[in-house]
Image: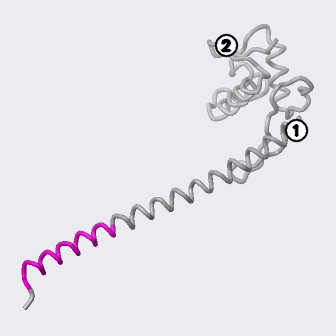
Amino acid sequence: MLDPELLERITARRAELDELEERLAKELAEVRAERDELAVAERVLERVSGQLAEERASNLPAPGQVAGRAVMLIPHREPGVEESTLPPDYQRILTVVRQAAGPVMAREVGEAVGVDIRVRAKLEPLRGKLVRLVDRGWLRKRPDGRFTTRL
């Protein structure tokens, strides 16, 4: 006859191992999911890096892909890169800022280019374009939030 104490220990150990197996299977699933996410991020990074390299090589705004949508990449202001390489709406924004008597707020630019400034959802994309022009070196943003042309 089998020792009941030994059988109890075996049963308890089997339960511990079953619990450990379940925990490890869950962790393995999480690791695999994170690896899949990293693989996607790596592909996106490669695609965007390639697009940026092409844009810099051509010094022209090139259509890119973000979430499957075509977007216009705005070139950095560098010697030899003309304002005419910017999309027309960005050129209009630069013209408005340049023609202003001094630093301007996004609202003032919006009024000049025909954006309904009372609707925040219409003003925010314009503000995004102004910030993008600042990031690319075409404009300067003052600490008070006003925009000016670069010297």
**The C terminus sits in image quarter:** top right
Q: Residue furthest bottom?
A: 1
Q: Which residues are magenta?
A: 3-22
Q: Looking at the picture, which amino acid does disc 1 mark?
A: Ala
Q: Looking at the picture, which amino acid does disc 2 mark?
A: Arg
Residue 144 x, y percent position in the rendering: 62, 12
Determine the residue positioned at 77% across, 44% down.
71
Query: What SS does tag 1 mark?
Result: helix
What distance separates the C-alpha of mark 2 from that of mark 1?
31 Å
- Position of 11 with respect to 108 (left or right) is left
- Residue nearest the observer in this picture, 112 or 63: 63
**The N terminus sits in image quarter:** bottom left
Q: Quadrant of residue 96?
A: top right
How many neighbours does mark 2 have within 10 angstroms: few (below 14), some (14-19), or many (20 or more)? few
Provide the residue designation for mark 1: 57
- From the viewer's perspective, is residue 60 above or below residue 50? above
Determine the residue positioned at 17% across, 77% down.
10
Residue 100 x, y percent position in the rendering: 80, 12
